[in-house]
Image: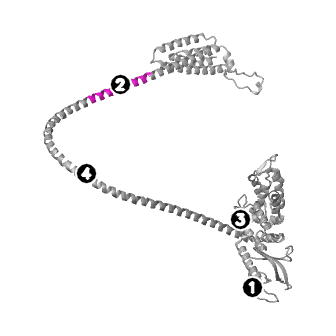
Amino acid sequence: MALRAALLKSIWYAFTSLDTEDSGKVSKSQLKVLSHNLHSVLRIPHDPAALERHFSDDDDGPVSSQGYMPYLNQFILDKVTEGTFVKEEVDELCWTLCSKKNYRPDTPRVLTNQDALRLWCLFNFLADDKYPLTLVPEEAEYLLRKVSSVMTVELSCVEFEELQSRDALSVWTFLELVNAAAASRDADAESLSMAVEKVYREMVGNVLKEGYLWKKGHLRRNWTERWFCLKPGSFSYYASEDGKECKGVIEIDQNCCVEVLSDRDGKRCMFCVKTLNKTFEISAPDSRQRQEWITALATAQRLSASGRSSLHEELKARRRDQREERERRHSLREEETRRLQELQEEREEQQLELKLLKEAQIQTRVSQKEEEKRRSRQQEELQSALEKQLLQAQEARANLRAEVAVRDLEAEHQRRRIRELEDLHHRLQEALEQQIRARQEEETYRYTQTRLLAEEEEKVKSLLALQEEQEEQLQQTQREKLELKQEMDKKSQDLSEAQQQLDKVRASRRRVDQDIVAAQRKLRQASTSVKHWNVQMNRLMHPIGPGERRASSGNLLAPPVRVPSVSETESRPPTKDQQNNLECEDNSSGENMDCGNNENTEPTDLEAE
């Protein structure tokens, strides 16, 4: 995840550099070129077909970073394997794309392009995974102090205070600040470059410590000066400082240990690194460097045991936690200060209210005393007035007793009169209630009668409608029979008689339903008779004689019997039996029995034929 986040930071700069109009979108043709270059530097097999499928549109319309992220994750970042590519080449590609657009310092350039690239990588390393990428002033100050500690020229406190006064810095603002600070101090470009390179190797390259040490051989047992490079989990040594020819790697894990050795063989400040298989004897230039190497080896062993690959990642996380803790404490202090201010204001308000209450209490006491004096005077006056009224009341009581006796007699007379009136009122009220109930019942009866009349009218209407429908059906049946059987005059007479009977039925309301049911029954019997007539006709058209058999193989030349169709049957003139059946359809219910007898006699006639 750390490698993926670091690659994504560099690619983000490359994407934003292609956005020439600062609209957050990049043309598809530029993204195709960027994707091809990323496949090359990351040593990933390039699949042009997948690229074309993702950007299937023919136009070169703009694409936002969110639209490019699915392709970037699926076809590039998900296929990256650590150790198969050089991270510096990816950084150099992205730096080349973004520096042309954004790195234009106002002051004369003190930093070389390589130094700016390394500072850009250091900035990305220290920046949080929040886009757009920025660096808090504390992290920028830490990086500048780290670089200035290696150089002979240090930044002043004024410059650090100016850095603290700023908000979060972008990488281009940070590079301008470094350029301006180096130009104002007349810093040597070479020393600045060496300092930046050392800090870059330490923080980005995860180099805990490097330098020349003397190492004792295992076979020849001679002492050789080697360039040692310590990283978490590995202690490598090279033939020279350029690091091109690696002579060996010592694995630093939980099974190795570092011990201090006494001076011997003309070497001093010695220590050894013991592994499971070998023991490496090493000599440092002085005791201070030996102690630094031993401390660095202990740090590498601790990082390897905890599964971490970078010391500065751990330090960055600690600084971030410390910043969050400081911000939390600052917010708590501000909250406490605000609460104290609120409590102070509330206390002042309470004191003011207490003072007002005391003044109001004093005024209340004075007013109470005056009120007591006034009440005492009023009570004295009231007592004297009451004594006079008492005398007058005694005199009035005697007069009232006489009046009360007279009024009691009048009241008794009035009570008797009231009782009589109440009885009369109850009787009148009962009579009124009876009248009201009678009127309500009358209204109920009238409403019921109206509803029954309405229902009767609706039934009459429905009966008339049914009669009209029956007439229409009868007329339609008559037309069909006249068209099919033009010679059935008797049928027309019977239909006219049925029409007269229906006219008579209209005059009698009680027999309407029975006549309608009878008419419907007649229709069903007529349809049954027609069906029966069709069956009889079919039988008449194909009579079967006695002793008749199916055509045998020797009678193949006999003419086939053709079955007449329904249309041919209807087009033929009706026979005598058919006329009898049609006459039976128009007769009354009593005549239906005769038709049934005629139908029963038909098989006998057929047998005779």
- Residue segment shown in magenta: 428-453
The answer for how far apart the CA atoms under marks 1 and 3 are is: 46 Å
Going from the N terminus, do you reach mark 3 or mark 4 first? 3
Going from the N terminus, do you reach mark 3 or mark 2 first? 3
Nearest to viewer (mark 1 / mark 3): 3
Colour scheme used in the picture? one colour
**Residue 374 part of the magenta-drawn span:** no
The numbered mark at residue 162 is: 3
Q: Is residue 573 left or right of residue 82?
A: left
Q: Position of residue 246 (x, y in %)?
A: 85, 75
Q: Is residue 402 left or right of residue 194?
A: left
Residue hosting label 2 = 442
Q: Are marks 1 and 2 in contact (CB under 8 Å)?
A: no
User: Could you say which is closer to the camera, residue 176 or residue 331?
Assistant: 176
Residue hosting label 1 = 260
**Residue 444 part of the magenta-drawn span:** yes
Going from the N terminus, do you reach mark 1 or mark 4 first? 1
**Rendered view: 463 above or below 434:** above
Quarter residue 74 falls in:
bottom right
Q: Are marks 1 and 4 in contact (CB under 8 Å)?
A: no
Residue hosting label 4 = 378
Specify whether residue 45 is in view. Answer: no
Q: Is residue 98 left or right of residue 139?
A: right
User: Could you say which is closer to the camera, residue 239 or residue 150?
Assistant: 150
Q: Amino acid at mark 1?
A: Val
Residue displayed at 25% across by 52% down? 377
Q: Secondary structure at mark 2?
A: helix
